[in-house]
Amino acid sequence: TITEIKSKWGEVLEARGKIGNPKTVEKIFTKIKERFGKLDILVSNAALGTFSPALDIDDEAWDLAMEVNAKAYLRCVQKAKDMMPSGSKIVAITSLGSQRYIKGYASIAVSKAALETLTRYLAVELAPRGINANTVCGGFIDTEALRGLPDFESLKQQVITRTPGERLGRPEDIADVVAFLCSEDSRWITGQTIIVDGGFSLT
C-alpha cells in the first residue's frame, strides 16, 4: 500500500502502533505536524473486537472494542483539529452492526454506534472551523474481517439473496464514498451517516 501511494502521490509518512494507546496517537500527530504542518483529511478506519453474544461479553472484550473503535477516534480528532484548516474533512468508518443485529458482533457494534453518535457531535462543534465530519456505514463488504464472522458462508448466501445487486460489497464501494466525502463536492454534508450496502437494509 505504501509503495502504491508513493507511486501515485509521492511522499508518505508511516507511523505504526496500537491506535488504542494514547501515546501512539500523540506520536502519530506529532510526526504529522513536524513533517507537513497541517492535516486536510482524517479517515478513521480502525476496528477491533471479539465475537460473542452480548450476554457473554466480559469487561476486557468490551473495553478493547470501545478503546480502539471509539475512544481512539475521539483522541485522533482532538489532536488533529488544531492543524486542520477550513475545508478539511473527517470520515469515520462503521458497519451495519451499529444499526441492526449481527450474530456475535455485539461489542464491535456498540462501539461503532458510539462512533456514529460522536461524529454528529463533532460535526456541530467543528462547523465553526469549517471542518466537516461524516460517517460511512458499510454493509457486508468482502474483506478478511467479514470472513472472520461466525458462519460466514451461510451469512454470505443470506446477504447475497437479500441484496438487490445480488453480491457482497467490495472495498472500493466504500472507498469511493469516502473519497467523495473528502472532496470539495461534499462541502454541505456534515454529521451524516451514509449507509453503503447495495440496498441490503431496504429488504
Image: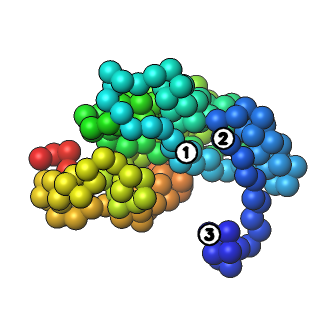
Question: Disc 3 residue type?
Answer: Thr
Q: Name the residue under label 3.
A: 1
Q: Which of 111 and 61 is in front in this view?
A: 61
**Residue 37 badge:** none
The x, y position of residue 82, in whole percent, is 75, 35
The x, y position of residue 140, in whole percent, is 30, 53
Q: Can residue 154 be seen in this view?
A: yes
116 relative to 85, above or below: above
Q: Mark 2 points at which residue?
A: 19
Categorize mark 2 by other alpha carbons within 10 Å: few (<14), some (14-19), many (20+): many
**Mark 2 and mark 1 in contact (Cβ < 8 Å)?**
yes
Element class at badge 1: loop
* Residue at horizontal 27 percent and vertical 38 percent from the top: 102
Residue lying farthest to the bottom in this orientation: 7
* Residue at horizontal 60 percent and vertical 39 percent from the top: 131
* Residue at horizontal 53 percent and vertical 36 percent from the top: 69
**Residue 46 badge:** 1
Upstream in sequence: badge 1 or badge 3:
3
Upstream in sequence: badge 2 or badge 3:
3
31 relative to 179, above or below: above
Q: In which quarter of the image is the N terminus?
A: bottom right
